Amino acid sequence: MINHIRKFVDLKDTEIPILYNYLKPIDLKKKEFLIKEGQICNRLYFVEKGCLRMYFINDKGIEQIMQFALEGWWISDYYSYIDNKPSDYYIQSIEKSEIISIDKESYDLLIQELPKMEGYFRQVMLKAVAQSQLRIKLHFDLSKEELYKLFTTSFPDFAQRVPQYMLASYLDLTPEYVSELRKKKL
């Protein structure tokens, strides 16, 4: 996490213990949940090691993956976090994972003690919004086949790391269609 923070702000070695005072490590087993639908999400989660997914269950009873988070990525239900409302999402580990989390009160105290961390979080959130905007644009601009090809060429290791049905859900494809595309070696 320290290396990630230092990509955005100048975090000094003497400030690291201050930072760690506000963080809570969480070890997750495969398929373990951080939050479930209906719970209030009161933490931000940083993936130190492993992989998480955020999904909801649509009105047809099908899981729809909204986001994945790999090493160095943040994940949370930001609406639930900000408004203190029950979450519409599940956040679950896909594999054994090491997470670092921060709750709202600790976040506010950290920002007071290390104001530069507000700049870090702002930059991380802006990048997340930009990625979300790009994902939506690509969903409108590209065919299903082009979207699959772009994702698998941009993130080849990741595409092999997650189960095919999860990749299909994230790209809004059927698992059968993903199987066809894999056979074509796209």
Image (tube, rainbow, N blue to C red):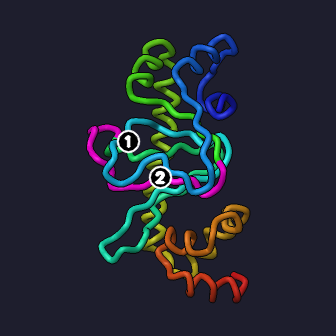
Q: In this view, does 166 lie above or below 129?
A: below
Secondary structure category for the residue under label 1: loop
Residue 54 percent across, percent down from the top left: 47, 56
Residue lying at 62% horizontally and 40% vertically, measured from the top left:
27
Mark 1 or mark 2, which has the lower sequence index? 1
Specify start and end residues of the magenta stretch as a single range.
Answer: 81-96
Residue 39 percent across, percent down from the top left: 34, 46
Q: Quadrant location of the C terminus?
A: bottom right
Residue 93 percent across, percent down from the top left: 57, 53
Label tally: 2
Q: In this view, does 107 lie above or below 182?
A: above
Callout 2 amino acid: Ile
Residue lying at 57% horizontally and 70% vertically, measured from the top left:
167
Callout 1 amino acid: Cys
Q: Does the magenta stretch include residue 55?
A: no
Residue holding disc 2: 91
Most foreground residue, 26 or 185: 26
Residue holding disc 1: 41
Residue 77 — which label? Answer: none
